[in-house]
Amino acid sequence: MRIQIIAIAIITLVASPVLAEVLNGQIVRQNGTGEFVKLDTLVPFSVGFDTFDNDNLYAFDEDQNIFLKEAIKVDIGGQDGQIPAGTLVASHYVFFDSLSGIQIGYVDFDAPILGVAAFQDTMSATDYLANTRVNYISTELRGLEEGDQVWVDEKEPNRLWVYWAGSSPGDYVRIFTGKSGNDLMM
């Protein structure tokens, strides 16, 4: 009986999908009254061009367990600006859609950040990896503008820092992480 239970547990762990997710975040400083909000993609919503218009820092998980058949270009991180073919990644979206605010904050993931698509061309080129019920609108206006910054924390590779000034249409980035640290222990 005990051997059957152990065998079932092992099969369940091996068959379980490898996930990586947004854990939490925080606004450290801003001119406004926003907070960190993790959105649930099981409930359809639209994102882009002033669909939120508030001072919150938002994040949500896109597709998981993506085996890259070919390398993807990223603006931050990667190996020579790319995440190589053959890498297993998870995709996430972080944005600030304020009418006129400045925000410094961070978002934590449960896996190391491999790369960030921060400009319109790299975001468009990776849209096929989103695979959510989210309606992405005004995609030609996504990315960061001059003066906006995002970076991966040197001491905490699962943390993305943001410093951006939101206005119409907002600031949007896509983050690629590896496997969840919890999943690596299985």
Image: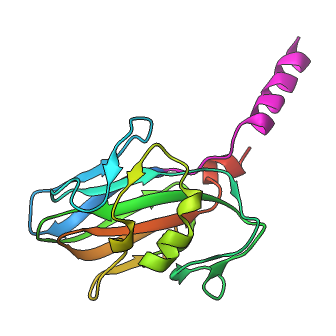
Residue plotted at (16% across, 59% down): 55
Residue plotted at (39% across, 66% down): 139
Q: Is residue 98 left or right of residue 184?
A: left
Residue 120 lies in magenta, yes or no? Answer: no
Residue plotted at (25% across, 76% down): 164
Q: Relative to the observer, which residue lies in front, 157 or 33?
A: 33
Question: In the rendered image of this protein, does residue 131 appear above or below residue 174?
Answer: above
Which residue occupies the extreme top position in the image? 1
**Bounds of the magenta segment:** 1-21
Q: Position of residue 26 (x, y in %)?
A: 28, 59
Describe the colour scheme in one phrase. rainbow
Locate the C terminus by quadrant: top right
Q: Is residue 97 visible?
A: yes
Residue plotted at (17% across, 69% down): 29
Q: Position of residue 172 (x, y in %)?
A: 35, 67
Q: Is residue 116 left or right of residue 149?
A: right
